[in-house]
Image: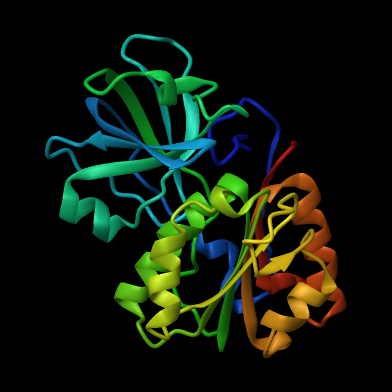
């Protein structure tokens, strides 16, 4: 099993793919052509004070990926490539001829590892797509719940944008945890979806004592899920983030009545 984190950190990865639900059939394993291409970094922009959005110029190359998948990336010629979840939908990638990757930074905001520290114009080798943390071919759930911690938002953003384009009537909720209120990547995009009635947005902060934040606080727990779970037995859940968040989320979702087969996860050990 491939092991990675959403932001490319070299840490233990765990992907949980249920197998006893119509939305989670093992027959969904897709045979995809994995390619290796060399392309430049076109832009590096702050996504939050602690992360960077790295945009790769595809130069007309086609990478046939599913929302939620990842690519392996390294500076051109380097032997070891790091995995990064793709933070854009296939539709957005095709429109812009780019791939977007969310790369975590250190406490001061500087990129800590990998391609986030490279300047624009740097050539990188990209291999992929890889990963099984994806949407089912057919979504028959009444609701779709996304749960993100930190940079775990990257693959979920790709899924949300894809569903908004392909299934605009889908009922979706996003429960999004960050340390501080300025550490929500893509938050204005999600707020725009929420304002338009396309997405229920529930952000929560864990370490922000500022009085400027008027939203929810604390680690994601039962009370957070009770606010977002409308039909537990008819909800398909995608959870991505650190091991602790994912493990606690799965236990709480099951305690609230979500069938095990309707919970998909991706986690890493930090």
Residue depicted at x 58% and y 27%: 108
Q: Is residue 259 visible?
A: no
Q: Is residue 221 left or right of residue 193?
A: right
Farthest front residue? 211
Q: Is residue 76 left or right of residue 78?
A: left
Q: Is residue 30 left or right of residue 145?
A: left
Q: Is residue 268 above or below residue 238?
A: above
Q: Is residue 196 left or right of residue 43?
A: right
Residue depicted at x 60% and y 55%: 181
Residue depicted at x 39% and y 88%: 169
The C terminus is located in which quarter?
Answer: top right
| Residue 5 drawn at (x, y percent) | 60, 37
Q: Is residue 141 above or below residue 126?
A: below
Near-viewer residue (173 or 29): 173
The N terminus is located in which quarter?
Answer: top right
| Residue 259 drawn at (x, y percent) | 76, 77
Residue depicted at x 31% and y 14%: 76
């Amino acid at each position: 099993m491939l092991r990675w984190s959403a932001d490319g950190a070299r840490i233990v990865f765990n992907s949980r793919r249920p197998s006893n639900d119509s939305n989670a059939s093992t027959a969904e394993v897709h045979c995809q052509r994995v390619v290796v291409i060399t392309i430049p970094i076109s832009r590096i922009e702050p996504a939050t004070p602690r992360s960077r959005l790295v945009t790769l110029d595809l130069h007309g190359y086609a990478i046939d990926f599913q929302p939620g998948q990842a690519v392996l990336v390294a500076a051109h010629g380097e032997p070891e490539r790091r995995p990064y979840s793709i933070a854009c939908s296939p539709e957005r990638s095709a429109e812009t001829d780019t791939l977007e990757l969310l790369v975590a930074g250190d406490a001061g905001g500087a990129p800590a590892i990998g391609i986030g520290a490279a300047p624009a114009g740097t050539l990188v080798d990209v291999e992929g797509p890889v990963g099984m943390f994806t949407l089912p071919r057919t979504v028959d759930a009444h609701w779709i719940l996304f749960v993100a911690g930190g940079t775990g938002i990257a693959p979920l953003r790709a899924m949300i944008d894809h569903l908004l384009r392909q299934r605009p009537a889908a009922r979706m909720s996003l429960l999004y945890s960050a340390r501080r209120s300025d550490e929500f990547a893509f938050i204005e995009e999600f707020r725009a979806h929420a304002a338009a009635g396309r997405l229920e947005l529930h952000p929560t902060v864990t370490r922000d004592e500022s009085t400027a934040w008027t939203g929810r606080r604390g680690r994601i727990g039962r009370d957070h899920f009770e606010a977002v779970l409308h039909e537990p037995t008819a909800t398909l859940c995608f959870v991505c983030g650190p091991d602790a968040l994912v493990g606690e989320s799965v236990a709480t979702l099951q305690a609230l009545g979500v069938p095990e087969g309707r919970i998909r996860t991706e986690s890493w050990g930090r």
